[in-house]
Image: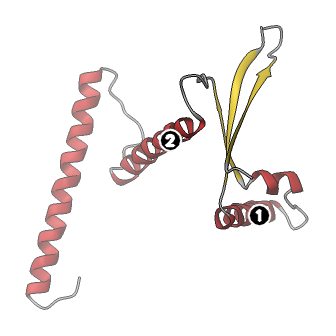
Amino acid sequence: MPRICEAQVSFHLAEERPLAVRLVALRLTEKQRQDAQKRKRKKASQRGKKSKPTAETLYLAGWLIVVTTLPASRWSAQEVLSLYRARWHIEFFFKRFKQLLDVHQVTCVHQERVQAGILVHLLARERLRRKKEFICSCSRQCGYLV
């Protein structure tokens, strides 16, 4: 069975014309599938003692499924999955950025001010990191464990 497969499907939204999309699916490795199914079971058990994931849910947990409108003539299934992976890395970067700098809401509305605010936060974070490294190195030189 191939690890990557794709299909063309159409969605009919109300009275709009059908929306043609492409499903690109990656079958996860056995380890990834088991880990994903374990997470599904744990999440279901947190909802209640009698709650169990369906067989369909457990099966689908073994797949990464991406829905796209990118044409197959220009974007291979592998390229679509690579784009999705890159997008996920960008999302993760911003999540970590917001957590580490405790920036959960940007109050600026002008692009220049937002950029300046982000730069100030990055500089402050770097200064704190360097200060911590300095304190740790001094502590080690003096025989303290940090």
Q: Whole-percent x and y of residue 32?
A: 64, 62
Q: Whole-percent x and y of residue 87?
A: 48, 39
Considering only order in the chain, which callout, 2 or 1, is on the residue closer to the N terminus?
A: 1
Location of residue 44 by image quarter: bottom right
Q: Which residue is mark 2?
A: 82
Asked whether residue 54 appears in the rendered view, the answer is no
Q: Nearer the viewer, residue 127 or 23?
A: 23
Q: Nearer the viewer, residue 20 or 89?
A: 20
Q: Whole-percent x and y of residue 27?
A: 69, 52
Q: Nearer the viewer, residue 82 or 89?
A: 82
Asked whether residue 97 appears in the rendered view, the answer is yes
Crowdedness near tag 1: few (<14), some (14–19) or many (≥20) residues, C-alpha within 10 Å: few
107 in relation to 57, above or below:
above
Asked if residue 110 lies left or right of residue 41, the reply is: left
Residue at (24, 23) in percent of width and height: 112
Q: Whole-percent x and y of residue 20?
A: 72, 19
Asked if residue 62 lies left or right of residue 126, the reply is: right
Q: Which residue is mark 1?
A: 46
Quarter of the rendering occupied by the C terminus? bottom left
Q: Identify the element where label 1 is drawn.
A: helix
Asked if residue 22 lies left or right of residue 57, the reply is: left
Residue at (79, 21) in percent of width and height: 11
21 in relation to 53, above or below:
above
Count numbered badges in the picture.
2
Q: Identify the element where label 2 is drawn.
A: helix
In space, the residues marked 1 and 2 are separated at their CA atoms by 33 Å
Asked if residue 65 lies left or right of residue 130, the reply is: right
